[in-house]
Image: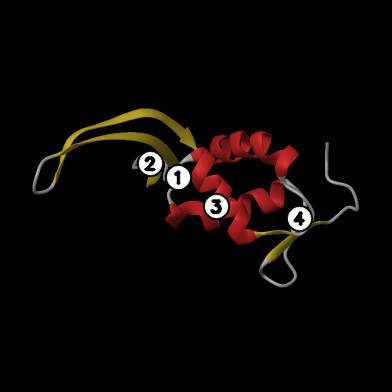
Amino acid sequence: MYIKSKCPVCGSNNFHNVQVRIEETRKNLSLKDVNVTDTVTDEELAREVLHGLKPHVCDGITIRELCRVIKKYYGVAAAYCCDLVSRLKIEMGMYCPDRRHLYFVSPFPPQ
């Protein structure tokens, strides 16, 4: 799962791929281990997601569906999906007239 943090030195946003290991006991769950496996900038994460999503994004896709795909396949925490969708919208040349559906500005999606 990717979580977002702000770099204390330069102030840019970074996303950390965090793996959490939880142990289940009879009464509750306990946190055993947390590892950060990768750290990327928001531009790098957007580029990676954009590269993977291009073939699957169609004209008229809903923002909710796009967020669901990003959360499920890229492990981005729900709280950061809106930021990522806004960035992807710009990168893919899309607009959102009704605040629900995304459409390509040009009649054909970029290849």
Which residue is labeled 3 in the image? 68
Q: Nearer the viewer, mark 1 or mark 4?
A: 4
Whole-Å distance between the Cαs marked 2 and 3? 27 Å
Q: Earlier in the sequence, mark 3 or mark 4?
A: 3
What is the C-alpha distance between the residues marked 2 and 4?
A: 29 Å
Q: Which label number is shown at residue 7?
A: 2
Q: Earlier in the sequence, mark 2 or mark 4?
A: 2
Q: Earlier in the sequence, mark 2 or mark 3?
A: 2
Name which of mark 1 and mark 3 comes first in the sequence.
1
Residue that appears at 59% across and 60% down: 64
Quarter of the picture holding the N terminus: top left
Element type where label 3 sits in the image: helix
Classify 72 as above or below 60. above
Which-is-in-front pick, marks 2 and 3? 3
Numbered circles on residues, count: 4
| Mark 4 lies on residue | 94
Q: Residue furthest left?
A: 27
Q: Find residue 92 and report its horizontal and vertical position in percent.
A: 74, 47
Q: Which residue is mark 1?
A: 13
- SS of the residue under disc 4: strand
| Residue 105 pos. (x, y %) | 84, 56
- Residue type at numbered disc 3: Arg
- Mark 1, Cα crowd under 10 Å, few <14 / some 14-19 / many 20+, is some
State the separation of the CA atoms marked 3 and 4: 18 Å
Q: Position of residue 44 (x, y in %)?
A: 56, 34
Q: Marks 3 and 4: CB-CB under 8 Å?
A: no
How many residues crowd around disc 2 within 10 Å: few (fewer than 14), some, or many (20 or more)? few
Front-lying residue, 38 or 57: 57
Mark 1 belongs to which amino acid?
Answer: Asn
